[in-house]
Amino acid sequence: MTRDKAIKHWANIAETVFWAEENIAQEWHDRLSDAPNLSKKEQHKLAQDYCHAIASEIVSKTTDEELNRWN
């Protein structure tokens, strides 16, 4: 893969993550706003849950055929 293709590939991934974040932002706003008041352990768990929610949002818009191509 060329450097330019790698940059385009990662840019597409970043764009997809930003799109998914926008779609779940309202639902997560209060939980994320409270993060500074949590312990480090709770913040880490919240970050994991948030990443899982983003990934779930992305996959929810992916067809089974697309998922099969990822194998």
Image (cartoon, rainbow, N blue to C red):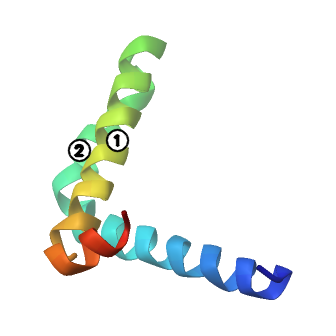
Q: Position of residue 14 (x, y in %)?
A: 54, 71
Label 2 crowd bin: few (<14), some (14–19), many (20+), radius 10 Å: few
Q: Reply above or below: 18 against 34.
A: below
Q: Is residue 47 left or right of residue 62?
A: right
At 54% across and 81% down in the image, what residue appears? Answer: 12
Which amino acid, mark 1? Ser
Number of numbered discs overlaid on the protein picture: 2
For the residues labelled 1 and 2, the Cα–Cα distance comes to 5 Å
Secondary structure under badge 1?
A: helix
Q: Amino acid at mark 2?
A: Asp
Q: Which image quarter holds the N terminus?
A: bottom right
The residue that label 1 is drawn on is 33
The answer to whether marks 1 and 2 mark residues whose Cβ atoms lie closer than 8 Å is yes
The percent position of residue 15, horizontal first and vertical second, equals 49, 78
Asked which quadrant contains residue 59, the reply is bottom left
Side (left or right) of 53 relative to 40: left
Instruction: Using residue 61 as the reference point, say whether residue 17 is left or right of it.
Output: right
- For disc 2, the marked residue is 30
x, y percent for residue 63: 17, 78
Q: Position of residue 18 (x, y in %)?
A: 44, 71
- Quick check: 36 above or below 41? below
Q: Nearer the viewer, residue 5 or 68?
A: 68
Q: Is residue 39 visible?
A: no
* One can see residue 19 in this view: yes
Quarter holding the C terminus is bottom left
